[in-house]
Image (cartoon, rainbow, N blue to C red):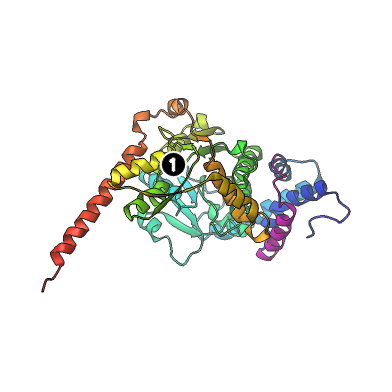
């Protein structure tokens, strides 16, 4: 299928490409690959900021045009066929009611995803985990008691079967560093949302980024914003949760390098981020999921305090009992590097990621007042772990282990 005729204007080419995107994504692998390359060529800039989600909504919502009706029919018919083929495997006959406790966690092996799985299992949910086929299987998820199914958001035809018998989808997925940002974070998410809508998923939770609506120049944040809008417009019962930063990410970025006496990379920018423990994010997520008054709302989760990079490094130094070897990268260097990488097609995705880094290292506050959210969820602010407590526990545990290893090493030394 060709995306547009040569006589169409640039705007009509974009509209045509968008309207047929989902149909093409749900076709066979070969058709999906060819259409994906075409659509990426058409939508190569950020010009689709305010129009992309609207246009996609038009292709999935009710319309008087016969072509739109045909597209919806094809999508739903194809989804039903895939679902029916899988129903026998999971012993679900036609008309079998879906249990409210059945959830699908997408991106279950990630930093947040695994905490969502752990929390869901602890609270008695029936958890199915969507993970990509990989050489190292996600055995730890099975050991916890979850069911693991293989699928890939970049291959939309693999998605419908994973949704059979599912009541709620919790989307924690993100693309790999070596992938184009749009492959999973936009095209894959759109396909997932379309499939969820077609198959009657009752609830959909999507994690986004705080302030994503304020940075159209940053591809990742722009994509998050457009996905939010698309999810709202398509009519799924949903909750959108914007996040500021994970405490877990600070371990590899600062704590471990300091302990290993390696360089710690920072910037000269006064950016402040209210980091939050992913265990708290998971706990608040399920509180929100059970609260019918929150469905359809946009929430933002932030930690108790916003920290600058230098404040985090200073805290790690104090808890580790040693100084950090800090290498400071000026923000101006990040900007220049981003501009240079834009000159070459094969470095566009590097530039996209540098654009996000540039926002994180600018004079920006990634935090919100949580009093209203705590009240809405019925949560006590004192129950949210602070960064000081989180890092204190980490360093106490790791330093104790290092001490025990050294003591054991001395006991096994052989002297001649």
Residue at the extreme right? 7
State which quarter of the image contains the N terminus. Answer: bottom right
Q: Nearer the viewer, residue 198 or 194?
A: 194
Q: Nearer the viewer, residue 218 or 12?
A: 218
Q: Nearer the viewer, residue 125 or 301?
A: 301
At a point 35% along the width and 57% down the height, the residue shown is: 143
**Location of residue 309 in the rendering, given as x and y in whole percent from the top left corner:** 44, 41
Work out which residue is located at the far left of the displayed protein and give it: 416
Q: Is residue 31 magenta?
A: yes
Residue ID at (53%, 35%): 364
Residue 159 against residue 234 in the figure, above or below = below
Residue 246 appears left or right of 14 = left
Q: Which residue is mark 1?
A: 309
State yes or no: residue 177 in magenta. no
x%, y% of residue 193? Answer: 61, 47
Picture layout, residue 379 above or below residue 50: above
Q: Is residue 136 visible?
A: yes
Q: Residue at x 61, y 36 (%)?
A: 214
User: Can residue 80 be seen in the rendering of this structure?
Assistant: no
Q: Which quarter of the picture shows residue 125? A: top left
Instruction: Give, as a single range, the part of the protein colored magenta.
Output: 29-50
The majority secondary structure of the magenta stretch comes to: helix
Residue 103, image x, y percentages = 48, 47
Q: Nearer the viewer, residue 88 or 101?
A: 101
Quarter that holds the C terminus? bottom left
In this rendering, the count of numbered labels is 1
Question: At x 24% / y 55%, what residue is drawn?
Answer: 402
**What percent of the width, then of the height, locates residue 268?**
49, 42
> Which element is circle 1 on?
helix
- Residue 166 relative to residue 191: left or right: left
Give neighbour class at mark 1: few <14, some 14-19, many 20+ (Cα, 10 Å).
Answer: many
């Amino acid at each position: 299928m060709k995306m547009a005729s040569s006589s169409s204007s640039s705007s009509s080419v974009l509209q045509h490409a968008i309207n047929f995107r989902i149909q093409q994504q749900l076709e066979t692998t070969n058709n999906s690959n060819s259409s994906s390359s075409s659509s990426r060529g058409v939508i190569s800039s950020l010009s689709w900021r305010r129009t992309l989600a609207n246009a996609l909504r038009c292709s999935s919502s009710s319309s008087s045009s016969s072509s739109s009706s045909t597209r919806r029919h094809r999508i739903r018919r194809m989804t039903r066929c895939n679902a029916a083929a899988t129903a026998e495997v999971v012993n679900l006959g036609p008309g079998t009611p879906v249990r409210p406790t059945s959830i699908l966690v997408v991106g279950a092996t990630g930093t947040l995803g695994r905490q969502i799985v752990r929390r869901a299992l602890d609270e008695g949910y029936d958890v199915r985990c969507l993970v990509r086929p990989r050489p190292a299987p996600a055995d730890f998820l099975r050991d916890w008691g979850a069911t693991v199914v293989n699928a890939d958001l970049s291959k939309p035809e693999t998605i419908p079967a994973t949704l059979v018998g599912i009541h709620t989808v919790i989307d924690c997925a993100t693309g790999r560093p070596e992938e184009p940002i749009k492959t999973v974070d936009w095209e894959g998410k759109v396909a997932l949302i379309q499939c969820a809508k077609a198959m009657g998923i009752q609830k959909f939770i999507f994690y986004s980024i705080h302030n994503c609506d304020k940075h159209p120049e940053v591809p990742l944040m722009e994509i998050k914003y457009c996905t939010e809008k698309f999810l709202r417009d398509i009519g799924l019962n949903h909750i959108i949760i914007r996040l500021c930063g994970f405490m877990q990410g600070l371990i590899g970025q600062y704590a471990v390098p300091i302990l290993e006496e390696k360089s710690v990379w920072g910037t000269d920018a006064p950016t402040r981020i209210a980091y939050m423990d992913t265990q708290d994010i998971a706990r608040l997520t399920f509180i929100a999921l059970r609260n019918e008054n929150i469905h359809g709302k946009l929430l933002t989760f932030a930690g108790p305090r916003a920290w600058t990079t230098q404040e985090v490094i200073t805290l790690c130094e104090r808890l580790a009992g040693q100084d950090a070897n800090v290498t400071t990268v000026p923000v101006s260097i990040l900007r220049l590097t981003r501009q240079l990488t834009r000159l070459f097609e094969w470095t566009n995705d590097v530039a996209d990621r540098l654009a996000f880094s540039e926002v994180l290292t600018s004079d920006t506050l990634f935090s919100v007042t949580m009093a209203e959210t705590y009240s809405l969820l019925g949560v006590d602010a004192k129950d949210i772990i602070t960064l000081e407590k989180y890092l204190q526990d980490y360093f106490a545990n790791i330093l104790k282990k290092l001490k025990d290893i050294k003591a054991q090493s001395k006991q096994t030394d052989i002297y001649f």
